Amino acid sequence: MKTILFNAAMAAAVLMFTACGNSKKTAEPMADSGRTKRTEALLSSMRQMAQAGHYMFGHQDDPVYGIGWCGDADRSDVRSVCGDNPAVLGFDLGHLELGDTCNLDGVPFSRMRQEIIRHFDRGGVVTLSWHLDNPLSGGTAWVADSLKDVERRTVEAVLPGGEKHELFLSWIDRVAAFLNSLETPYGVRVPVIFRPWHEHTGSWFWWGQDNCTTEQYVALWRLTADRLREQGVVNALYAYSPNQMSNATKESLMERYPGDDLIDIFGWDQYCYAPDADTTAVAAYAADLDAFLGIVCETAQEHGKVAALTETGFEGLKTADWWTRTLAPVLARHPVSYVLVWRNAHDRQGHFYAPYPGQLSAADFVSFYNDPKTMFLRDLNGLYIISN
Ligand code: BMA
């Protein structure tokens, strides 16, 4: 019976190829939300995973460079240590808006696209951040003191009526074109978690707390999502990710929340800052993370959202047992769907967040990998299966 069905499917596919001439696109099943059913399937799989007490491990730029290498064809520091790839790959779109061929960290967008499609093909998850330049000052995403006056007018300038509105729309359109190009040879759009306008509770980015009003920040989000939709983007989940601040409360996390109709994933960015192996600072990070993830997960649940630790890490991994003694015990207490650690820079001494062979925390990372709660690529199964 199976063979007959398979043959029937093959015949239908052949007919379709013939009918469509050069086009090899298949029609993607669409959900009522206007996104592909696969995109919605990913969201519900993430929800189920978090509820079941599992979380995916993610690493920024994992397959494109690491400590002592850059641009190799099939390599990963994480895999070199534990034998498996991260479940989640993070990439950054910064400089895509300029029409550049490489992102702000030198990753070619063509390679990024290839890795995203490959990761989806093997069942993994992709998240994209966007450290875009400042369209008003011409500077970077980061606020420079000398340009503060200009930077504080930037969000206003990109909104409707602002002097950089048209330019900004063209920047979003470049993101839309990239998201639309994430397609398998069978015409399947690869679902991604898009996480723009992150860490807005700090003021280091031009869209940050002191650099725009609440209304402007929310309008920025709405403009972005509306424009992407108008440009045919049907494969994006949206993640909101405030960052650590002292005295974060539910109210402060919600102050600039763009709305339940727009946001899918409620994230949190918090790093472990500790000079050398300062165990007091590491313990303080764990205690803070525990408290804040409690608030984040409770807020996410109240709004029907999936929670995630969208960025974290200990730069330089200076304590040998950071994974199993610091990070895992906290994550075990909160229903987060994934944790993403930042990049292993190949060209910036000590700027790494995942272990590599021989690194101080490598053995501990293997124990973290073996923890039944952590999900790596081989642990994933059917995240994108569409149920009606
Ligand atoms: C920062 C650093 C920078 C990098 C940026 C965007 O945290 O890693 O070196 O350019 O993220 O990836």
Image (cartoon, rainbow, N blue to C red):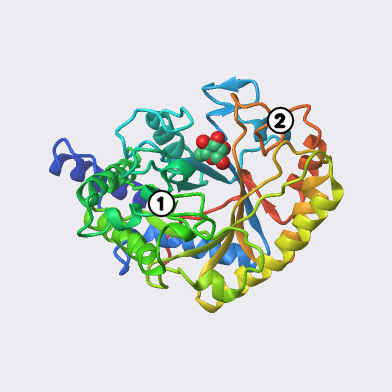
Q: Quadrant of the C terminus?
A: bottom left
Q: Earlier in the sequence, mark 1 or mark 2?
A: 1
Check disc 2: other Cα within 10 Å, few if <14, some if 14-19, many if 20+.
Answer: many
Q: What secondary structure is marked by label 2?
A: loop
Q: Amino acid at mark 1?
A: Pro
Residue 36 or 144: which is nearer the viewer?
144
Residue at point 85%, 52% (across, down): 280
Q: Where, by quadrant of the figure, is residue 77 drawn?
A: top right
State whether residue 138 appears in this view: yes
Q: Which residue is mark 2?
A: 356
Residue 73 or 159: which is nearer the viewer?
159
Q: Where, by quadrant of the figure, is residue 335 drawn?
A: bottom right
What is the x, y in percent for residue 341? 63, 45
Q: Which residue is mark 1?
A: 191
Q: What secondary structure is marked by label 1?
A: loop
What is the x, y in percent for residue 9? 30, 49
Residue 124 or 101: which is nearer the viewer?
101
State whether residue 144 appears in this view: no
What is the x, y in percent for residue 134? 37, 43
Residue 251 or 161: which is nearer the viewer?
161
Q: Where, by quadrant of the figure, is residue 112 drawn?
A: top left
Residue at point 44%, 33% (across, down): 104
Asked if residue 325 is positioned above or below residue 358 in the image, the reply reads: below
Q: Nearer the viewer, mark 1 or mark 2?
A: 2
Residue most toward the bottom? 302
